[in-house]
Amino acid sequence: MTVVAAHEELQPAHAEMIKATLPLVGANIDAITRTFYSRLFDAHPALLRNLFNRGNQAHGAQQRALAASIATFATHLIDPDLPHPAELLSRIGHKHASLGVTADQYPIVHEHLFAAIVEVLGAETVTAEVVEAWDRVFWIMADTLIDMERGLYEQAGVSAGDVYRRARVLNRVDDPSGAVLVTVACEANFEPGQYVSVGVTLPDGARQLRQYSLVNKPGDGRLTFAVKPAGEVSEWIRDNLRVGDLVDVTVPFGDLPVPAPGVPLVLISAGIGITPMIGILETLPVDARVQVLHADRSAQTHPLRERQRELVDGLPGASLQVWYEDLMSLDGVELPEDAEVYLCGNDGFVRAVRDQLLARGVTRVHSELFSPNDWLLS
């Protein structure tokens, strides 16, 4: 995980103003973010067509994610004794980098977000003092992310935002579960558990982006990602992408930490959340100690089931336990006290299993969500 920290603290007067207005902003945050995105897309319609996930916008997931992220960060600034939201900011920064977000886009967000705050709460409530305090919250958070994203681009060896590559499809495998594995030619370094953004042009002309975890071992000039056909981009890939085609793929990003040598691992997943776990299994040394726990609706819907079994069988110190139909329960599952736990799946699964782990005193948990709801993990 990339460690980030705010460069500045709020001035006492700003902190008091945030404390006083946070409940009001929080009570209206859904309306504020809806208004913000409406204003943003009215002024910049290309952002919805070519950058933002239209599905998440339609379901409100992106709006809730923005609202919760800003509220979480503001809460930390007025109470520094709370846990620092470093993990939240790290996940946001990596996702931004994977989408090619650049520093010049933050003032655009600022303009329409603050206009939305005034529109929803009223100019008589949003005084100059209120605007000044929340302006500091926004720019402390934004500057932290901008610096982090600049560092991520430098680490990747690319100019800011220059993350997309035209890559040729070398192989396509239709997994029995319905998932599609796509291999493209791309010279890019990556770590196990990272992901790429894939951009496709849909029938209505919109260029939409989705992120997919890498499932192959690095080092051979190829990237293999697994696609669950749910949503317009994933379904387009399933129906249209063939060997020999060209597709836009980013250099990899993602902040799941690389497993430390000699430390026992527990890899917990559900559904397509298996993909970063496959990426980790592909790179483990033969003496690795690892427990693999996976939940799915059935053996037929279990993605990469055969490859998972092959990888586990190739490690003498590995074991595999699977739950079908039933919810995963860790009751009776012995976990090493010094284990590093990796957890990936849908929101409800990750939160439920994380609660079980925390109840058992397991705190070294690295989580990944395939949604904008990273704030749920903070």
Image: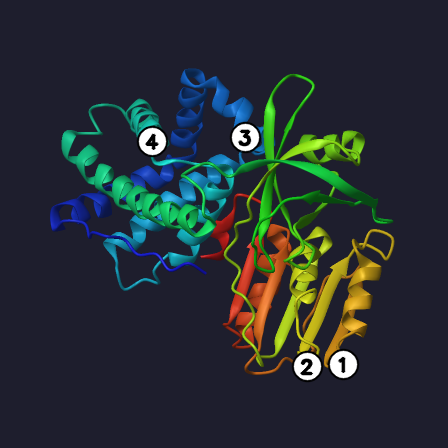
Of the numbered discs 2 and 4, the one sitting upstream in the chain is 4
| Mark 4 closeness class: few <14, some 14–19, many ≥20 residues within 10 Å | few
Residue type at mark 1: give it: Pro
User: Left of 20 or right of it: where is 345?
Assistant: right
Nearer to the camera, 178 or 101? 101
Which quadrant is the N terminus positioned in?
Answer: bottom left
Of the numbered discs 3 and 4, the one sitting upstream in the chain is 3
Of the numbered discs 2 and 3, the one sitting upstream in the chain is 3
Q: Nearer the viewer, mark 3 or mark 4?
A: 4
Residue 272 lies, with reference to residue 232, above or below; the image says below
Of the numbered discs 1 and 3, the one sitting upstream in the chain is 3
Q: Which residue is drawn at 35% across and 63% down?
A: 83
- Alpha carbon distance from label 1 to label 2: 7 Å
- Alpha carbon distance from label 4 to label 1: 51 Å
Nearer to the camera, 105 or 222? 222
Q: Residue 57 carries which label?
A: 3
Find residue 254 and report its horizontal and vertical position in percent. 52, 53
Which structural element holds mark 1? loop
Residue wearing tag 1: 316
Residue type at mark 2: give it: Asp
Q: Which residue is drawn at 37% across and 60% down?
A: 3
User: Left of 163 or right of it: where is 268?
Assistant: right
Which structural element holds mark 4? helix
Residue wearing tag 4: 104
Residue wearing tag 2: 287
Residue type at mark 4: give it: Asp
